[in-house]
Image (tube, coloured by chain):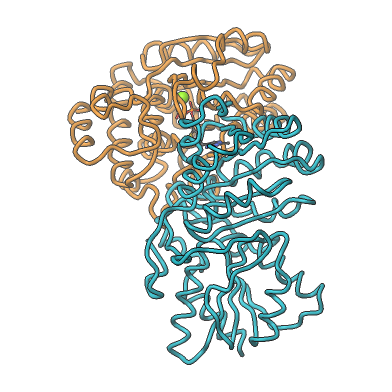
Chain colours: A cyan, B orange
Amino acid sequence: MFYGEASGLKMGKATRDAFGRALEELGKDRTDVVVVDADVGNSTRTEWFAKAFPERSFNIGIAESNLVGIAGGLAASGKTPVIASFACFLLCNAYDQIRMSVAFPELNVKLVGTHSGISIGEDGPSQMGIEDVALACSFPGMTVVVPADEPSTRAATAAMLDHRGPVYLRLGRPSVPIVYENGVEFRIGKANVVRDGKDVTIIANGLMVAVALDAATALEKEGVSARVVDMHTVKPIDVEAIRAAAEQTRGIVVAEEHAPFGGLGSVVAMAAAENGISTPMRFVNIGDRYAESGDPMGLLKKYGLTPEAVADACRSVLG
Amino acid sequence: MAVASTTSIDELKEKAKTLRRHIVRMTTEAGSGHPSSSLSAVEVVTALYFGGFLRYDPQQPRKPDRDRFILSKGHAAPVLYAALAEAGYFPVEDLMTLRKLGSPLEGHPNYKRLPGIEASTGSLGQGLSIGIGHALAVRLDGYDARVYVMIGDGEMDEGQVWEALAAANKYRLGNLTAIIDQNGYQQTGATKDVLDLTPLDEKIRAFGWHVQTINGNCMESVVAALDAARKVTDRPTCIIAQTKKGFGILDVLQETGDVNFHGKPLPPDLAEKALEVLK
Ligand SMILES: Cc1ncc(C[n+]2csc(CCOP(=O)(O)OP(=O)(O)O)c2C)c(N)n1
Ligand SMILES: [Mg+2]
């Protein structure tokens, strides 16, 4: 793995690893943080927190609905529960529990979905979270964050704990390139321009930020100047970043490792429409389908999540 | 329908070894997967497919009166693929395409892509409910087909399994058999440490089921238990198959210092050793 080489990015850790280390670190001062696991802590990396703070860690077995309910109770009694599982199991298996025990009572539960997208590879579609962002965004009051790399995941983990209210943090399995080599200013709800440009804007999040940077690098050779915006917060969306893209460039391409409906693309398009922002748009995503087992790079290619696909969408949006 | 009912215990044991070799080879070739979870289930799957219990026809995989086998613990897909290949659903060579892009032998069973797969599984806890649906449907249609569902002992943590246990009893599904692969481990450790469900047999009996507890890696016991289950027709039956995760190559796994060996393939050198043991 991976993309980002063409843009001079170095490889970093997987975002799940960055989260696990950050949580372990933050747990020292944040004695209110409690971790509950559903038998996947060695995959989600909450096991590192659990080793450091066994008295504040619980493993309740393979039972995601129960996991979410327990977190709701912990939060209602003043704790800051962090619960992590595969994105698909957490959001899909426990959807109503998130609704009734977290979102509706607006409790301070931190939901962390690892193994998102198709880049998990060989385990296949049953383990791939491709609907999770849409589901998370559907809950009133839920904040939804999809960081791109190791440094921004560390910052996002801290921001998530500081934020009061339910948060969904979406993470990935494979190692990803470092986008923010020189540090990151991370504010929930505030997008980051990671590369400026004047012809077209690529709005991306997660590992698609590195893919977008490679697309921008390729476009530069054709004399097309592409801006890349890391829209790490899907909800609440940064309307001003979209407005600036529309005013300062000639079109927007939204790129995400997710199914097409209800994810970043939908949220950006709706925010634009609602705010009178009119600009041509294209959308790069997995498409309206389930993927399959395979090697991560092969899957990203087959399912259209490549720098070439993003660059093509940019050419198309520029007409 | 094709039924290999005349197979002797010795032949079944040979077949079990063949499945084990496939499991080791295909996961090492794939470079990922769950061989230990597959190996514990080999005797049960072998007896079902080759001991005359499942009535199936690889030429007509969706024949309405077939018996069904649902692998609810879908991560053990290699044991199912090995059995399906040996049963003639697809060529044995295809096993080596496990988990590769384009292959229907995905990391977890995919109902849409591979004949012989009765349910898409991989999100634990759902297979028994699907099994109830099949059992109700075949009863409505007047077929005497049986439905077998294999569940992991860690998978028993999922609440949906207990909802299903209750529902199957309500409808007295005498054509439904649940087999729990009780290998004592789940992803993060021993089931007794993660979530102790003992006494599992008494709990399930209290749900109205007929329950047997057996040595699930002993072919004679497995065949006897499946035979006994088949004769119970007034209520759902459960076989708690006490097994060992990685059975067949336990000494080889011991060398790794990880008796659970969850969710990883044998490195090529250990796979060689394992295949030696399984000769
Ligand atoms: C709903 C759900 N949660 C979590 C997982 C991740 N997972 C895969 S296998 C496994 C452990 C399963 O243990 P068990 O059922 O005992 O099967 P074994 O591997 O021991 O045969 C877990 C937690 C999953 N596949 N599905
Ligand atoms: Mg087990």
Quadrant of the rendered structure where residue A314 is?
A: bottom right
- Please state if B257 lies on the left or on the right of A186 as rendered: left
Q: Is residue A155 above or below residue B217?
A: below
Q: B193 or B222: nearer the eye?
A: B193
In this view, which residue lies farthest toward the front? Answer: A29
Q: Residue at x 58, y 46 (%)?
A: A113
- Please state if A12 lies on the left or on the right of A137 as rendered: left
Q: A251 or A302: nearer the eye?
A: A251
Residue B182 can be seen in this image: yes
Q: Pinpoint residue B233: horizontal percent, then vertical percent.
A: 63, 13
Q: Could you tell me which quadrant the N terminus of chain A lies in? A: bottom left
Residue B116 can be seen in this image: no
Q: Pinpoint residue B252: horizontal percent, then vertical percent.
A: 23, 27
Q: Residue at x 39, y 31 (%)?
A: B38
Q: Is residue A225 above or below residue A25?
A: below
- Total marks placed: 0
Q: Pinpoint residue B28: horizontal percent, then vertical percent.
A: 29, 42
Q: Could you tell me which quadrant the C terminus of chain A lies in? A: bottom right
Quadrant of the rendered structure where residue B207 is?
A: top right
Q: Is residue A97 above or below residue A284?
A: above
Q: A101 or A30: nearer the eye?
A: A30
In this view, which residue lies farthest toward the bottom? Answer: A223
- Please state if B40 lies on the left or on the right of A77 as rendered: left
Q: Residue at x 46, y 29 (%)?
A: B188
